[in-house]
Image: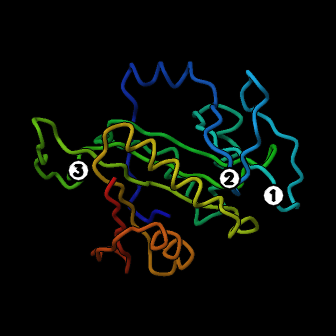
Amino acid sequence: MNIRADLTWAPSAHAASRVAESPPRVAWLVDDVRPQAPAGGRYAERMEDRADEPGRQVQVLEVQPGTAHFEQVLILAARVLAQDRYLASRIPHALESHVLAAFDGTRCAGFLRYLVQVIGAEEGRPAVMHKGEPLLEGYVEAFGVDPQRRRRGIGTALQQHAARRCRTAGCYQMRSRSPVTSAENYALKIAAGYVLHPSHQNDSYYFLLRL
């Protein structure tokens, strides 16, 4: 979860064109349920699920602004610490911005927005260079799970998929910040191997994970 001041972000013209053209994509199935694909086939984008039944399959999609999926994410985010503003805000220093959403059938069960950015850029620090390139990080700008669907692996799925994507993008680390009142988020991050560093804002801590 994120409690930073409202910032702004806009994709480049090239990124904006990719956003407009890219449909939601199935990213991962949570709850450790991975059905076998038929011979020569692929996993179906829509699974027959029963939302209240153990072992259900929840899809993680990347969603784009202006789509019906994104509107569902905004509705849920508005209910979870009023985070909808963090999903639609503009952030000038971000190189990339992505919103992941977990869907149980047609219902949005969780969301995560992450940025790819140069480490230190948000604080105006000079870039740390390594092998001639600035070190990058994935920063979790917003994160939440429907209170009725928590403790079912949805948050872990979103966090792990974001970390894998950031690793593929060449990021050195993952980082986020949460208030000390977010006990469930702290438990999730500590279990995933994140280290903590105190923040000077709002009784919160930064979480960092080397990718």
Spatial CA span between label 3 and label 2:
30 Å
Q: Looking at the picture, does residue 95 appear above or below residue 15?
A: below
- Front of the two marks 1 and 3: 1
Residue 119 disc label: 3
* Residue denoted by label 1: 55
Relative image position of residue 149 (x, y in whole percent):
74, 64
Q: Looking at the picture, does residue 14 appear above or below residue 198?
A: above
Residue 30 disc label: 2
Kindly indicate the quadrant of the structure image that contains residue 178: bottom left
Query: Three-letter amino acid code at disc 3?
Result: Ile
In the picture, measured across the screen, residue 52 lies left or right of residue 127, that is right
Q: Residue at x 81, y 54 (%)?
A: 56
Relative image position of residue 199 (x, y in whole percent):
29, 73
Colouring scheme, one of rainbow, by chain, secondary structure, one colour: rainbow
Query: Three-letter amino acid code at disc 2?
Result: Val
Relative image position of residue 100 (x, y in whole percent):
57, 44
Q: Residue at x 76, y 68 (%)?
A: 148
Query: Three-letter amino acid code at disc 1?
Result: Gly
Between disc 1 and disc 3, whose residue precedes? 1
Residues at marks 1 and 2 touching, judged by CB atoms closer than 8 Å: no
Q: Nearer the viewer, residue 71 or 184?
A: 184
Q: Residue at x 57, y 75 (%)?
A: 184
Residues at marks 1 and 3 touching, judged by CB atoms closer than 8 Å: no
Q: Looking at the picture, does residue 165 appear above or below residue 146?
A: above
Between disc 1 and disc 2, whose residue precedes? 2
Q: Residue at x 36, y 49 (%)?
A: 138
